[in-house]
Image: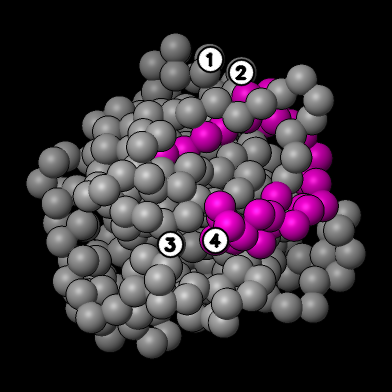
Amino acid sequence: MPVTIDSVLNPEQMDEFRANGYVVVRGLFSEDEVATIRDAFMEQGKNGPVPGLSEMIRGTAPNGYDKSDPLSFYPRMMHPHKHPELPLVGPLAMRYMLDERVGAILRELFQDEPIATQSMFYFKPPGARGQDLHQDNYYLRTKPGTCMAAWTAIDDADESNGGLVLVPGTKDLDIACPERADNSKFFTADHVEPPAGLKPEPLNLKAGDVLFFNGSVIHGSYPNTSKDKFRRAFICHYVPATSAECSHWYQPFLKFDETELTIPTATGGGPCGEMVAAPKAPH
């Protein structure tokens, strides 16, 4: 059964989360902490993609990066917390993925103990494509309930440099089967069309702000049309400890004391049929 957790969010924040399935906690991480995260990942990626850490560079179709694409040099880094052999980013990612400030908020939002499943770092340099609308639990396949993201802004993020958009009214939506994204605008392959009458709304964040949102919320991001501004982000995903199943692509699962936890593997591909390849990671 879910546990009752002492409040760490104010009533207005809880009302926002209950209404929309997402809430922003402003300034959760300090300027110095943000700089530490930013500088570590920039140093790790200064020579381009890191084998075993950076997203694999594909061909030019359907959603690959060619040499003219800024993401060919700065692809997202996947699961850095699983790389203790990389002293710049491995221990750092583990520390911030399991930061107790994040854990306390997740406990209140889940009303359960949070279990960490994934860490990622997005560089999103000037000129980079956006990410089309999607739902995170299509990839994690958490049941019952849904997953939760903690999306930490490492730079100020707005429409000009590829900030986020979210679709209010989708917090309880069933997971939809994605359509094909427009790869001239987006680097990912999936697109989820919002229900009739609902539309994406921009969300501006300051460096150090953390957005928490559940896995049903439809969201994405703009292309970075700025001349000289990165839109970096450190993003982690979590599931409640009472989850009955979750996709095996996110093992091993971790408690906040770094103890590994077993969650039964989700079967099949949910409402969209059998997944025969590794699901693309969210965001």
Q: Residue 117 carries which label?
A: none
- Do labels 2 and 1 touch, CB within 8 Å? yes
Q: Is mark 3 on a helix, strand or loop?
A: strand
Q: Which of marks 2 and 4 is nearer the N terminus?
A: 2
The residue labelled by disc 4 is: 187
Residue drawn at the location 57% of the way across and 82% of the way down = 59
Measured in 3D between alpha carbons, the distance from the residue under mark 3 to the one under mark 4, in whole angstroms, is 19 Å
Q: Residue at x 67, y 31 (%)?
A: 171
Question: Residue 121, position in %: x, y?
Answer: 37, 61
Residue at 66 percent across and 62 percent down: it is 189
Magenta stretch prevailing secondary structure: loop
Q: Where is residue 224 in the image (x, y as percent from the top left)?
A: 39, 47
Which mark is drawn over residue 19? 2
Q: Secondary structure beneath disc 1?
A: helix
Q: Is residue 182 above or below residue 216?
A: below
Marks 3 and 4, the one that precedes in the sequence: 3
Residue under numbered circle 1: 15
Q: How far apart are marks 2 and 4 (CA)?
A: 30 Å
